[in-house]
Amino acid sequence: MHKVLCLNKISPIGTDRLGAEYEFSTDMQNPEGILVRSAAMHDMELPAELLAIARAGAGVNNIPIAKCSEAGIVVFNTPGANANAVKELVLAALFMTSRKIIPAIEWAKTLKGSGKEVSKLVEKGKSAFAGPEILGKKLGVIGLGAIGVLVANAAQTLGMQVYGFDPFLSVDAAWNLSSSITKAASIDDILTNCDYITIHVPLNDSTRGLIGGDALAKTKPGVRLLNFSRGELVDTAALLPALESGHVAAYATDFPDDALIGVENVLAIPHLGASTPESEDNCAMMAVDQLKDYIENGNIKNSVNFPAISMPRDAQTRICIAHRNIPNTIGSFTALCGAAGINIENMLSKSRGDWAYTILDVSNDVTPDLLAELEALDPVVRARAI
Ligand SMILES: NC(=O)c1ccc[n+]([C@@H]2O[C@H](COP(=O)([O-])OP(=O)(O)OC[C@H]3O[C@@H](n4cnc5c(N)ncnc54)[C@H](O)[C@@H]3O)[C@@H](O)[C@H]2O)c1
Ligand SMILES: O=C(O)[C@H](O)COP(=O)(O)O
């Protein structure tokens, strides 16, 4: 029986796929797998038996990736599985930051009880809530991954002039991006030219504070800023005076902090980007399928710390080794197997940056001693037989 711990509410459409061979609970000791959404894991002690963490979603800044790699724990996410949900909310925010829809609705509520006067009061008061159309305006999209591409393409069909910036644009994203999107040469191109700016990059050490005082100073007066990625990408302390002065006309964020809540022209959304049944189902199914395939077969798809690697199984036993990407490591594996009288029928090794992963399909049973010898090799962080 495999054990999977669930740290957030995950759609049963996904968890039902675990099947009868899995014990699944929100509270258990020594799990082999963890399913998580946004629960903070940085301070969590990682159980010794833990093989993998599957993030049902995109962002993995809540997971201690480097610590997981050192322990040979494979971390998965579900690229693109919630991208449409976020795109739809970003489009809503484009309209809401333009047309003052939320404050206008709030004001309309205050007219309750005015009887026959309501329509007169509506006509008298509505001018306070006028706001521009998005048609023809310039939208800058920072980060053209799964979400950024969908936002850019949709905004273009709504008649916006769209500029995109992504120094690491993937080939897939380039294929999916409408040819009408203008490629920005630098982030400054976006900052200085655009009426609306939307951020779709991961939060990491190089993107934290991406939009700070210097960046805001380069933006056009009246710019509208949208952040559906992570709060710390935008420096709140620098943003507040820019909102106060009106230089930033509106800020829509899915990640409000205490200082932003209640501030005029801030649209503070409680992290609803991926909260649709469709996205929750998609993410849960992908996360569970990837986790199961890793636990049962050692295959890796959509990991953020180890390479993609997959091999059909046709031998008695599979040895899976997570290790550092160092020359001559595979030679030590085959030498140890040879010395133990193990016949390797098939093998595959892949690397990704500092880390690598090797699958050895062998025609014998594998002893705990051999696994211990493999794990004792300097570059190896985890060896197991399935
Ligand atoms: N609000 C929500 O509920 C919600 C839902 C999903 C994702 N997210 C957030 O949105 C982020 C993006 O999601 P995604 O699915 O599009 O991820 P993705 O990995 O498909 O795309 C991220 C893109 O950012 C680019 N990038 C990285 N650093 C950059 C930089 N400095 N400048 C410009 N581009 C840069 C990458 O090249 C990549 O193309 C996630 O990391 C997550 O934090 C939020
Ligand atoms: O990175 C993500 O996928 C989103 O922020 C969604 O987070 P959630 O799964 O906690 O809604």
Image: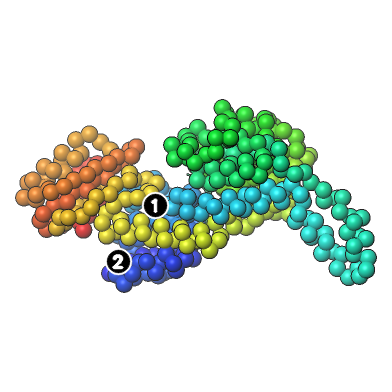
Occupied quadrant, residue 365: bottom left
Q: Who's the residue at 33% across and 44% down the image?
A: 307
- 287 with respect to 244 (left or right): left
**Quarter of the picture holding the N terminus:** bottom left
- Circle 2 residue: 2
Give the Cα separation between the discs numbered 2 and 1: 18 Å
- Which amino acid lies under the numbered mark 2 shown in the image of this protein? His
225 vs 322, nearest the viewer: 225
- 247 with respect to 210 (left or right): right
- Which amino acid lies under the numbered mark 1 shown in the image of this protein? Phe
Secondary structure found at label 2? strand
Q: Who's the residue at 51% across and 54% down the image?
A: 82
* Marking on residue 76: 1
Q: Is residue 263 above or below residue 180?
A: below
Name the residue furthest top.
Answer: 185
Q: Is residue 140 visible?
A: no
- Nearer the N terminus, badge 2 or badge 1? 2
Question: Residue 27, percent across and down?
Answer: 41, 69
**Quarter of the picture holding the C terminus:** bottom left
75 vs 312, nearest the viewer: 312
Question: Residue 159, percent across and down?
Answer: 67, 41
Using a 10 Å C-alpha cutoff, classify the residue at mark 1 as few (fewer than 14 neighbours), some (14 to 19) or many (20 or more).
many
Question: Residue 22, percent across and down?
Answer: 32, 69
Q: Is residue 169 above or below residue 320?
A: above
- 271 with respect to 67 (left or right): right
